[in-house]
């Protein structure tokens, strides 16, 4: 629980598999559209990644506070990697 007595649930932001199966298993984080500490809404673009063929925006899976950014701009990550944490209040 936080100081106000409300429990916070953490939701992982995961890079989904993008495109066809013949592409690479990795993507490059191009830029974050939101920063640590920003409030985000479910479905809102959160970051932009680059595959072998296209640039894609990854949306926030839930609304809440972007509490952790785990992948830096320019970093290469695998599909299904956790790149951020969103905290939701109950």
Image (cartoon, grey):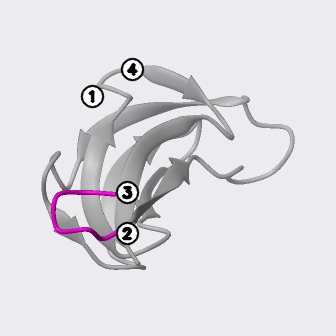
Decide: few, some or many residues near mark 2? Use Cα within 10 Å; few <14, some 14-19, many ≥20.
Answer: some
How far apart are the two marked residues, 4 and 3, measured between alpha carbons? 20 Å
Please tell me in which quadrant of the rendered image residue 79 appears: top right
Say few, some or many: other residues with alpha carbon within 10 Å of mark 4 (under 14 / 14 to 19 / 20 or more).
few
Residue bearing mark 1? 73
Determine contact: label 2, label 3, CB under 8 Å. Answer: yes
State which tag comes first along the sequence, 2 or 1. 1
Badge number at residue 75? 4
Cα gap from disc 4 to disc 2, whole angstroms: 26 Å
Identified at 35% across, 50% down, the residue is 48
**Which quadrant is the C terminus positioned in?**
bottom left
Q: Splitting the image into 4 quarters, where does residue 75 fall?
A: top left
Label 3: which secondary element:
strand
**Residue at the image position 68 percent from the left and 41 percent from the top:** 80
Q: Which one is nearer the viewer's eye here, 42 or 64?
A: 64
Magenta stretch: includes residue 69: no
């Amino acid at each position: 629980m936080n100081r106000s007595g409300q429990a916070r649930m953490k939701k992982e932001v995961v890079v989904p598999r993008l495109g066809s199966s013949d592409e690479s298993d990795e993507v490059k984080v191009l830029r974050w559209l939101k920063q640590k500490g920003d409030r985000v809404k479910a479905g809102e673009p959160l970051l932009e990644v680059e595959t072998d063929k296209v640039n894609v925006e990854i949306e926030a899976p839930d609304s809440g506070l972007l509490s952790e950014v785990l992948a830096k701009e320019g970093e290469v990550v695998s599909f299904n990697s956790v790149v951020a944490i969103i905290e939701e209040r109950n």
